[in-house]
Amino acid sequence: MSDQKIALVTGGVGGIGTAVCQSLVKQGVRVFANYYPAEAEQATAWQAQQKAAGYDIEIIAADVSSYEACEEMVAAIAEQAGLVDILVNGAGITRDSSMKNMDKDSWNAVINTNLNSVYNVTKQVFEGMTARGTGRIINISSVNGQRGQFGQANYASAKAGLHGFTMSLAQEGAAKGVTVNTISPGYISTAMTQAIPEDIRDKIVAGIPAKKMGQPEDIANAISFLSSESASYITGANLPVNGGLFMSF
C-alpha cells in the first residue's frame, strides 16, 4: 500500500472546494472530490478541466445527506485507494428566507446537507483514523454561524452546530492522533457571491475591515495547514478567515 495520504473533500467541485482540492494535490495528497449524483455531467467536465490544468483529482458521487450513500462512498474509496487520512466536510447549500416564510422543507434541506452530512461522512472514517493513530478532519463552517444573519436561521444553525461537533469530536480523537478543527470563512469571491447584485456586493465589501472579499485560496491555504503535520497540536479550534468581518477570542 502506498504511503500517499488520501483525502476526501465533500462539495469538492464547488468554488472553495476546487481550491481545496488543488491545494491538497500540491501537497502530494491523493484527492477524491465528492459531488451530488445529479450533477455527474458537470463533475466530469470539472474533472477534465482540473486535469488540463495539471491537477489529477478523482471524483466520487454521493448524496451526503444520506447515511447509506456515505457508507458506500467511503467503502468505494477504500477499495480503490485505501483509508481516508484527511476529511474536509465542505458540502453545503442555502435556502434563505425569513422565519415567517421559511417552510419545513427549506429548514430540513439545509440541516440535512450542511450538518447531518458531517455526521454521515465522519462516522465512516473516524474509527479508522483513531485505530491508525492519525487523521485530520476539517469542517467548513461560516462567519454567519458565529454572528447569525437575517434570513438564515437554518444556515446559521447548521454552521454553528458544526463547531459544537468539532469541539466534541476533538476531545474523542486528541489522545489518538486525530485532530478535528473548524474553518469559518467570511465572504469569499466565488460564482455564488459574484451573482449578488453589484450594489449589494459593494455594501458587503464596505463592511469588511479588509475592504475586500477573500479568495478560495485563502480557505484552501488554511485547510492545507490544518491538514499537515505542522498542525498536530491544534484541535478543537475554529479558525476564522473573514478579513476581520467578525472578531472574537
Image (spheres, rainbow, N blue to C red):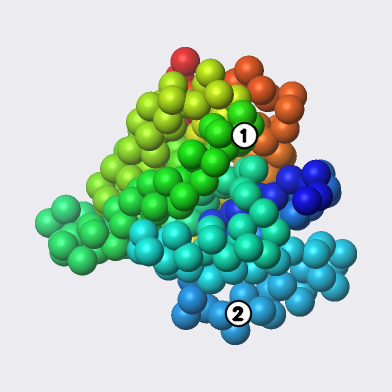
Residue located 38% across and 47% down the image: 119
Q: Helix, strand, or loop for circle 2? A: helix
Q: Position of residue 90 (x, y in %)?
A: 52, 51
Q: Position of residue 55 (x, y in %)?
A: 81, 62
Query: What amino acid type is highlighted by mark number 1?
Result: Arg
Quadrant in which residue 64 is drawn: bottom left
> Dot 2 corresponds to which residue?
42
Q: Residue furthest left?
A: 100
- Distance from the alpha carbon under mark 1 to that under mark 2: 35 Å
> Dot 1 corresponds to which residue?
132
Mark 1 burial class by Cα count in 10 Å: few <14, some 14-19, many 20+: some
**Residue 209 visible here:** no
Q: Are marks 1 and 2 in contact (CB under 8 Å)?
A: no
Which one is in front in this view, the residue at disc 1 or the one at disc 2? 1
Q: Residue furthest bottom?
A: 41
Residue located 47% across and 50% down the image: 124
In this rendering, would 149 be left or right of 17? Answer: left
**Residue 26 visible here:** yes
Question: 97 or 69: which is nearer to us?
Answer: 69
Quadrant in which residue 171 is drawn: top left
Question: 31 or 99: which is nearer to us?
Answer: 31
Q: Helix, strand, or loop for circle 1? A: helix
In this rendering, would 186 be left or right of 47? Answer: left
Mark 2 burial class by Cα count in 10 Å: few <14, some 14-19, many 20+: few
Label 1 or label 2, whichever comes before in sequence order = 2
Residue located 74% across and 45% down the image: 5
Q: Position of residue 15 (x, y in %)?
A: 61, 60
In this rendering, would 238 be left or right of 26? Answer: left
Q: Position of residue 12 (x, y in %)?
A: 60, 60
